[in-house]
Image (cartoon, grey):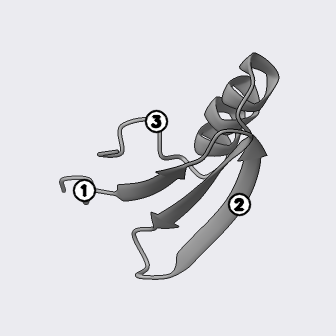
Amino acid sequence: MTNPTLFVGIDVAKTKFDVALLNAEGKYRSKVFPNTPVGHQQFLEWLTRHDAQEAHL
């Protein structure tokens, strides 16, 4: 069985970035992160929690 392709949309602004993930069940997950090195790390951790490290961004 192959893993479905996951997609993440990103809207980047000066102080924050919004992300939306379409997961394997067809449900959307979204979150806002600060556009800082800490926020980038939080985003990577969020992707890991949602098992989306291989997602198309």
Are discs 1 and 2 less than 8 Å apart at CB?
Answer: no
Q: Quadrant of residue 54?
A: top left
Which label sits in the foreground, 1 or 2? 2
| Secondary element at image label 3 | loop
Mark 2 — residue? Answer: 31
Q: Is residue 17 above or below residue 23?
A: above
Q: Is residue 42 above or below residue 55?
A: above
| Name of the residue lying farthest toward the top | 37
Residue situated in front as seen by the camera: 2 or 38: 38
| Name of the residue lying farthest toward the front | 14
**Which residue type does callout 3 highlight?**
Gln
**Which residue type does callout 1 highlight?**
Thr
Residue in the picture at 60% in, 52% down: 50
Q: How many marks?
A: 3
Sooner in the amino-acid sequence: mark 1 or mark 2: 1
| Secondary element at image label 1 | loop
Q: Position of residue 36 (x, y in %)?
A: 75, 25
Residue in the picture at 73% in, 56% down: 32
**Which residue type does callout 2 highlight?**
Lys
Residue situated in front as seen by the camera: 10 or 47: 10
Mark 3 — residue? Answer: 53
Dot 3, how many residues are within 10 Å of its Cα: few (below 14), some (14-19), or many (20+)? few
Mark 1 — residue? Answer: 5
Residue 17 falls left or right of residue 4:
right
